[in-house]
Image (spheres, rainbow, N blue to C red):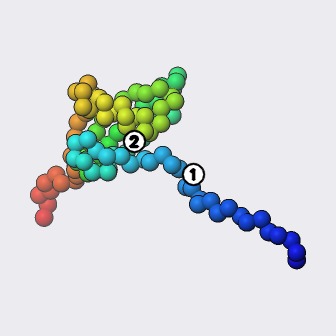
Amino acid sequence: MGRRRKKRKLIARRPKKTIPNVFQCPNCGKIAVTVELDKPVNGIKHAVIKCGNCGLYAEMNVPELFHNVDVYGRFLDGFYSGTLEYKFLAASEEEKAEESA
Ligand SMILES: [Zn+2]
């Protein structure tokens, strides 16, 4: 009754994932770039970078410690410096002309 309740500090809940998984595309400018990482093999991970908007696609091997943001950073570096090999995936490969109408 007479007890004073300690005022609880209300801390805004932070979502556990603070690392974004979608990044801005250096080609089209949309926030549509995703980074997928494979399981590390011998300390190296294979990363696939894709833009869901323009189809920009790149692969690279990164150290096991790399997170998505690190891969994205390296991807940007490579993109702008011209050292990255990349290509564009066709927006939809199902548009092959089907002549069975
Ligand atoms: Zn793009």
Residue behind mark 2? 35
Residue type at the position of mark 2: Val
Residue drawn at x 26%, y 24% is: 83
Image mark for residue 67: none
Q: Position of residue 26 (x, y in %)?
A: 26, 41
Above-or-below relation of 10 to 27: below
Q: Position of residue 70 (x, y in %)?
A: 43, 34
Above-or-below relation of 5 to 54: below
Task: Give the quarter of the figure containing the C terminus.
Answer: bottom left
Label 1 sits on a secondary structure element that is loop
Q: How many marks?
A: 2
Residue type at the position of mark 1: Lys
The answer to whether residue 87 shows anywhere in this view is: yes
Residue drawn at x 23%, y 52% is: 92
**Would you identify the image quadrant in which residue 48 lies?**
top left
Residue behind mark 1? 16
Q: Position of residue 4 (x, y in %)?
A: 82, 70
Task: Give the quarter of the figure containing the N terminus.
Answer: bottom right
Above-or-below relation of 38 to 21: above
The answer to whether residue 89 shows anywhere in this view is: no
**Would you identify the image quadrant in which residue 86 lies?**
top left
Q: Position of residue 30 (x, y in %)?
A: 27, 51
Say left or right for 88 vs 63. left
Label 2 sits on a secondary structure element that is strand
